[in-house]
Amino acid sequence: MADDVTQLLLDWSRGEKAALERLLPAVYDELRRMAAGLLRRERPDHTLQPTALVHEAYLKLVDQTRVEWENRAQFFALSAQVMRNILVDHARKNLAEKRGGGAQKITLEMVISEAGQRSAELVALDEALQELAEFDERKSKIIELRYFGGLSLEEIASVLGISIATIRRDMRLAEAWLYREMSNF
């Protein structure tokens, strides 16, 4: 199955439109699993559902014209990044609305609710990952692929072209750095 997806991606990169039509059924279950995993970490009343997140991400992915698809792992890595961006944008919009951007009156209880806190934490995590990427892009990418993309260590090694031992070491350092940064939140 992984070889089939890789072949479809390669065919799509070469401009074969039929490959794109066969790609979604081949990757849908995995994308939905990724989306469900990401949304499990969100607040319980999140308005996005896994299916909607997959569809929105897929629309953004098929719009990619500058990507030279190499393999399945690369596709799922980019999928994870796209889904993360969608969730962060959704959280920022949610926070903006709570600050008056939607011209909707809210009570103090609503502002300090867990839902608002989870959105704020996601935005803070995104900002911390961006800051980490400024001085160590690889560590930031490893965290993104593992926790947002749900990729295995072997898949991350394939995407980044580094050893699993390096991934483990970088993950420990990145997690410690993020923990410190998020403790200030």
Image (spheres, rainbow, N blue to C red):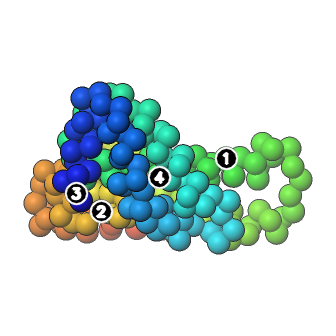
Instruction: Please tell me which residue is depicted at 69% across the width and 68% down the height of the picture.
Output: 45
For the residues marked 2 and 4, what is the alpha-carbon distance in whole angstroms? Answer: 14 Å
- Sequence-wise, the earlier of marks 2 and 4 is 4
Which is in the foreground here, disc 3 or disc 1?
3
- Sequence-wise, the earlier of marks 3 and 4 is 3
Mark 3 sits on what residue? 2
For the residues marked 3 and 4, what is the alpha-carbon distance in whole angstroms? Answer: 23 Å
- Sequence-wise, the earlier of marks 1 and 2 is 1
- Sequence-wise, the earlier of marks 3 and 1 is 3
Name the secondary structure under disc 2. Answer: loop
Would residue 19 be found to the left or right of residue 114 on screen?
Answer: left
Circles 2 and 3: CB distance less than 8 Å? no
Mark 4 sits on what residue? 84
- Sequence-wise, the earlier of marks 2 and 3 is 3
Instruction: Please tell me which residue is depicted at 35% across the width and 54% down the height of the picture.
Output: 26
Q: Amino acid at mark 3?
A: Ala
For the residues marked 4 and 1, what is the alpha-carbon distance in whole angstroms? Answer: 14 Å
Closer to us: 38 or 96: 38
User: How would you rate the neighbour count of disc 2 (Cα within 10 Å): few for under 14, some for 14-19, many for 20 or more?
Assistant: many
Q: Amino acid at mark 1?
A: Lys
Which is in the foreground here, disc 2 or disc 4?
2
Would residue 132 be found to the left or right of residue 162 on screen?
Answer: right
Instruction: Please tell me which residue is depicted at 42% across the width and 37% down the height of the picture.
Output: 62
Mark 2 sits on what residue? 151
User: How would you rate the neighbour count of disc 3 (Cα within 10 Å): few for under 14, some for 14-19, many for 20 or more?
Assistant: few
- Looking at the image, residue 182 lies above or below residue 27: below
Mark 1 sits on what residue? 93
Residue 22: where, in percent of width, then height? 36, 45
Which is in the foreground here, disc 3 or disc 4?
3
Residue 116: where, in percent of width, then height? 69, 62
Name the secondary structure under disc 1. Answer: helix
- Sequence-wise, the earlier of marks 4 and 1 is 4
